[in-house]
Amino acid sequence: MGPLIRLETTLTNDRYLNILSDHLYTFMPIVHSDGLGQFQQDNATPHASRLATKWPQEHSSDFRHFHWQPKSPEMNIIEDIRDALLHAIEMSSPPPLTPMDLLTALQDSWCKFPPGYLQTPVESMSRRFASLLRARGVPT
């Protein structure tokens, strides 16, 4: 699991490309030196721009880009991870009161996830694919 990146302003196409270049590109070879790392993003507007879809293609020798149908939320394990983080924040005591408290709580919760935490959502992908295929690409 990589670092959480604090974005202090609205995510634009240019800012997203900077995040990919500055953080993802340097992180993936460390974690997946075999080039077998999978990169997944949702279909948010900055992620779906022409430049943002071209960037992973240009770096395909460094890691693989995991594609899925637009508007297929059941394929998005990122949402599961976000929900787990939000749940951890809701359970924190005392609750975060300032943006800095929230950032600290998010980073603490992120670091407390067990090393194999992402394995469960990743292993669920074959089941998610099967559901999507049965539904012929329509959200299930």
Image (cartoon, helix red, strand yellow):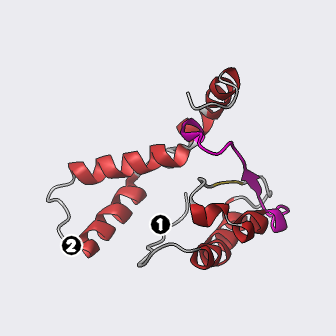
Q: Disc 2 residue type? A: Thr
Quadrant housing the C terminus: top right
Q: Specify the segment rendered in magenta.
A: 57-75
Q: Residues within 10 Å of mark 1 (few under 14, many from 20)?
A: few
Point 65% across, 23% down: residue: 135
Q: Is residue 17 above or below residue 136?
A: below
- Tell me the number on the disc at residue 115: none
Nearer-N-terminus badge (2/1): 1
Report if the CB atoms under discs 2 and 1 are less than 8 Å apart: no
The image shows residue 126 at horizontal and vertical percentages of: 67, 29
Residue at image mark 2: 98
The image shows residue 72 at horizontal and vertical percentages of: 59, 39
Residue at image mark 1: 4
Q: Residues within 10 Å of mark 2 (few under 14, many from 20)?
A: few
Q: In the structure shown, which secondary structural element does the residue marked by tag 2 occupy?
A: loop
Point 38% across, 46% down: residue: 84
Q: Nearer the viewer, residue 87 or 36?
A: 87
The image shows residue 103 at horizontal and vertical percentages of: 33, 69
Q: Nearer the viewer, residue 75 or 27?
A: 75
Quadrant housing the N terminus: bottom right
Q: Is residue 111 above or below residue 115?
A: below
Q: In the structure shown, which secondary structural element does the residue marked by tag 1 occupy?
A: loop
Q: Disc 1 residue type? A: Leu
Q: Nearer the viewer, residue 62 or 73?
A: 73
* Residue 73 falls inside the magenta stretch: yes
Q: Is residue 91 above or below residue 136?
A: below
Mark 2 vs mark 1, foreground winner is 2
* Residue 16 falls inside the magenta stretch: no
Point 17% across, 68% down: residue: 97
Q: Nearer the viewer, residue 77 or 4?
A: 77
